[in-house]
Amino acid sequence: MVPDPPKNRPLERFWPYADLPEQPTEAELASLDPDLHEALFGASPRPFSITLVFPSLDVPDFSRALALAKSSAEFRETGTGANYRYRARFWSSDAARLRDLFQIVGPSDATDVLIDDRPVPYARELWLPLVWLLIPR
């Protein structure tokens, strides 16, 4: 018993996206979670860094904050909608710009401080003031 032949013939290709690259793009690699990147490619030598992650804020100097963030060692915009965040990585040699940016976005509870891409206890209360000691007087 053979059923009726199909009225439509399916396409020969299976995937609707036939032109996917086999290697990830630079943007995809940059957006990887640091732990996943380390597991896939091994640890990459990088100097000590502090990263500020903050949303769009309704503060008077927010345009200045974005300018400071964009002048950091590494700047990325991640997420969409309510989860849209700005990420600005600073090396210890950029302590003055880090302090200036934190003075603008730091009072918000939505601002996260990451030490070498990881949330650590007392990052705001201990680590930031220790880095600010590096600012020449």
Image (spheres, grey):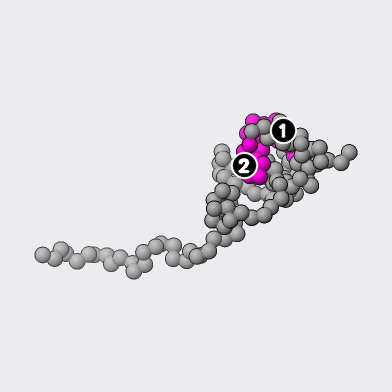
Give the answer, above or below, for where 75 lies relative to 4: above
Residue type at mark 1: give it. Leu
Give the left or right position of residue 71, taking residue 3 as reference. Answer: right
Residue that protrudes farthest toward the right in the picture: 137
- 10 Å crowding of disc 1: few (<14), some (14-19), many (20+): few
Q: CA distance from mark 2 to mark 1?
A: 15 Å
Residue receiving disc 1: 126
Residue type at mark 2: give it. Arg
Determine whether label 2 and label 1 are within 8 Å by CB. no
Q: Secondary structure at mark 1?
A: helix
Is-magenta flag for residue 33? no
Taking depth in this image into account, of 84 and 25 the one nearest to the observer is 25
- Location of residue 134 (image quadrant): top right
Instruction: Residue at 57% x, 45% y: name it.
Output: 79
Give the left or right position of residue 59, taking residue 37 as reference. Answer: right
Instruction: Residue at 76% x, 34% y: name it.
Output: 129
For the question of whether residue 1 can be seen, the reply is yes
Instruction: Residue at 79% x, 47% y: name it.
Output: 93
**Residue 20 percent location from the top left of the image:** 48, 64
For the question of whether residue 54 can be seen, the reply is no
Magenta segment, which residues? Answer: 99-120
Residue receiving disc 2: 118
Residue that protrudes farthest toward the bottom in the picture: 12
- Location of residue 136 (image quadrant): top right
**Residue 49 percent location from the top left of the image:** 70, 46
Give the left or right position of residue 32, taking residue 105 as reference. Answer: left
**Residue 44 percent location from the top left of the image:** 64, 55
Q: Secondary structure at mark 2?
A: strand
| Of the image marks 2 and 1, the number of the one nearer the N terminus | 2
Taking depth in this image into account, of 87 and 35 the one nearest to the observer is 35
**Residue 22 percent location from the top left of the image:** 50, 65
Is-magenta flag for residue 100? yes
